[in-house]
Image: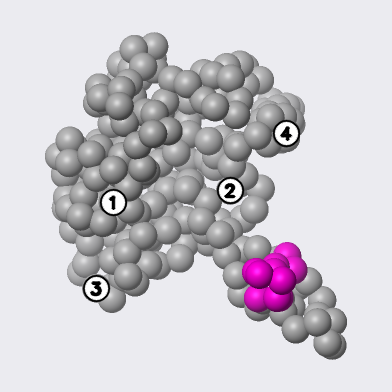
Amino acid sequence: IMSKDGEIIGVIPVKGTSERITLKNLRKFHDTSIFELKLDQLQLVENLDRIVVSSEDDKVLDIAINKGFEIHKRDPKYSTSDVPMSDVYSYIASEIEGEHIAWINVTNPLAGSEIYTRAIQSYRDLGAQYDCLLSVSNVQDYLFQNGSPINFKPNPWPKSQDLSDVCEMTFIINILKRKDMVDWGSCVGNSPYLHYINKIDSWDIDFQEDFDFCEMIYRNRQLKASI
C-alpha cells in the first residue's frame, strides 16, 4: 500500500531575470535553453499528475503554454530578492491545488526524465516516518566549520573516499505535502528521506562556469546519442 497517496503536482519556479547570469533560464544552451530543456525532460515523466510553471514573466509563461503546460502567473513581488524564500515557498504552494508538490528547479539541466520518475516513485513508496523527499548528492570533500574539521579527523589522514557521510541538497526535485510547504515555508521537514543522485546529474547552474560546464556535458551527450 502506498503511504503517499493523492495527486503529485510538479511545480517549476522560473524567474525571467537572473542576478548572476543574465537571462540564465532563457538564454541559448547548446540547441535549446535550460528552461525548455527541463520542460522537454518533464514531458517524459509519466508519474506526475500535473505540471505547473510559476513565473512573473510573460515570455516564460508563453513558452510553457505552447508546450502544453499549466501556468501560474506569479505576483512579481515574489520574484525579487527582497522577499525571503520562505515566503515564496508558502505563497506559491498556497496558490496551487493538489495533495503533494514536487518542487523542480530548471537549473539542473543534466538531470533527465528517468531521475524524476525514480524520485517520484521513491516518494510514493515512503513509509509514514518520512515527511518529505529531498534530492541530495554525496560530498566527498574535506569540510571545515569555524576553523575545525567537521567530517574527518586530521590524524591519521583519511582518504577522500573514507570521509564521513555528508551530503548537499541539489534541488533537482523535492517532494512534500502541499499543506506542509505552506506551513513550513520550506521543502525540508523534520524527517526527510534523502534521495541520492550522482554529482554530474546533480550539477546546479549558479555561475557562468557552471553554465559552461553543463552545456559542454550536455552537448557531448547529444553527440553520443546521435552516433
Is 175 inside the magenta-drawn segment? Answer: no
Callout 3, which amino acid?
Ala
The residue labelled by disc 3 is 128
Callout 4, which amino acid?
Glu
The residue labelled by disc 1 is 185
Where residue 222 sits in the image (x, y, percent)? 67, 28
Secondary structure beneath label 1: loop
Residue at mark 3 to residue at mark 4: CA–CA distance: 41 Å
Callout 2, which amino acid?
Ser
Picture residue at 24% right of the left edge, 73% below the top: 128
In the picture, which quadrant includes the C terminus?
Answer: top right
- Chain part drawn in magenta: 141-150
Residue at mark 1 to residue at mark 3: CA–CA distance: 21 Å
The residue labelled by disc 4 is 209
Q: Tell me the number on the disc at residue 5.
A: none
Picture residue at 60% right of the left edge, 70% below the top: 166
Q: Residues within 10 Å of mark 2 (few under 14, many from 20)?
A: many
Looking at the image, is mark 4 or mark 1 earlier in the sequence? 1
The residue labelled by disc 2 is 202
Q: Quadrant of residue 198?
A: bottom right
Callout 1, which amino acid?
Gly
Is 149 inside the magenta-drawn segment? Answer: yes
Depicted 53 relative to depicted 94: above or below: above
Residue at mark 2 to residue at mark 1: CA–CA distance: 23 Å
Left-right relation of 124 to 166: left
Looking at the image, is mark 1 or mark 3 earlier in the sequence? 3
